[in-house]
Amino acid sequence: MEITSKGLQSDFIFHGFEAVRTDHGDCSSVRTPNNPDYFFGNFLLFAGPPAVGDFTHWMAKFEEAFAPFPNIHHHTFQWLPSAPPDSAALKEFKQAGFTIDETSVLATQAVQTDKPAPAGVTFRKIRTDVEWLTVIDAQTRDGFPQIPMDEYRRYKEVSFANYRRMAEQGLGDWWGAFKGYELVADLGLFFGDSVGRFQSVETASEHRRQGICRALVHHVSNYGLKAHPGITLVMHADAHDVARGIYCSVGFEEIETLHAAYRPPVQR
């Protein structure tokens, strides 16, 4: 299956580093061996959206593909944005407890801003053990719906161990915005062939609506564009979240919309 979606191509910057991809005929599986709790690191990828009646087949394909890996308890399906999803087909997934994820894929080759960073805020790459731990704390502070905090924390710890290895191998960096010694926002930017992908933009709740996130995205974007001339920067954003507007204000524009269906483990 050829990955024609720019948004999914940018996902494979990370899957190519840590995951195993296997062809299953009408779909491919992606599995992250060291992080079975990662919903979007252990999934089936189809060439197009589900049609009415596909739910049973897709579930059977998932069970078959992941049967050798009993520590994967969730279900996640992604597909190429070859056509708009059928609402009736998605309803079958929703009735079975799935959440339908809608993601705006934003991209740019230039950024602009007319607002400087707030006074006292500085930006730097995350380097030390203490800084990496602080980032993990920040990224897990709000938890995730339906997921026990200990499981969510474990998933984040493994994810950030991978990000740190990628940074140490020169594939990108994690960045923090600091007020003095306090980490108030953070994000990652990693690079593949002709594309740079942002990851997990997070701002502490008490520091939101101050222009910090916008300034951090602008700063890191400029760094990436200068370090990799001609590259396209890609950002995934919840299609219905206010953060999308922040990224667009810096210069990102929507190039496609991705949909996926995921369900946390039914039994714990």
Image (tube, helix red, strand yellow):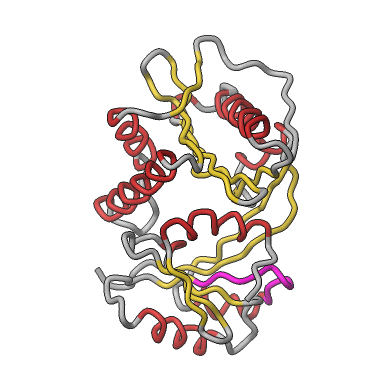
Where does the image place residue 228, in percent across and percent down from the top left? 65, 37
- Report if residue 8 lies within the magenta region: no
State the quadrant of the C terminus: bottom left
**Which residue shows up at 45% across the image and 56% down it?**
17
Q: Is residue 214 above or below residue 19?
A: above
Work out which residue is located at the far top of the displayed protein and give it. 119
Q: Is residue 265 above or below residue 207?
A: below
Toward which corner of the image does residue 36 lie, by quadrant?
A: bottom left
**Which residue shows up at 37% across the image and 70% down it?**
74
Q: Is residue 157 above or below residue 28?
A: above
Where does the image place residue 233, in percent across and percent down from the top left? 66, 43
Relative placement, left or right, of 91 versus 82 is left
Q: Is residue 56 above or below residue 107?
A: below
What number of labels is visible?
A: 0
**Which residue shows up at 44% across the image and 25% down it?**
184
**Which residue shows up at 39% across the image and 55% down it?**
145
Where does the image place residue 208, in percent across and percent down from the top left? 52, 27
The residue closer to the viewer here, 241 or 1, is 1
The residue closer to the viewer here, 106 or 165, is 165
The magenta segment: 77-86
Work out which residue is located at the far front of the displayed protein and give it. 169
State the quadrant of the N terminus: bottom right
- Report if residue 80 lies within the magenta region: yes
Relative placement, left or right, of 123 versus 229 is left
Where does the image place residue 172, in percent across and percent down from the top left? 51, 39
The residue closer to the viewer here, 151 or 7, is 7
Dominant SS type (magenta)? loop
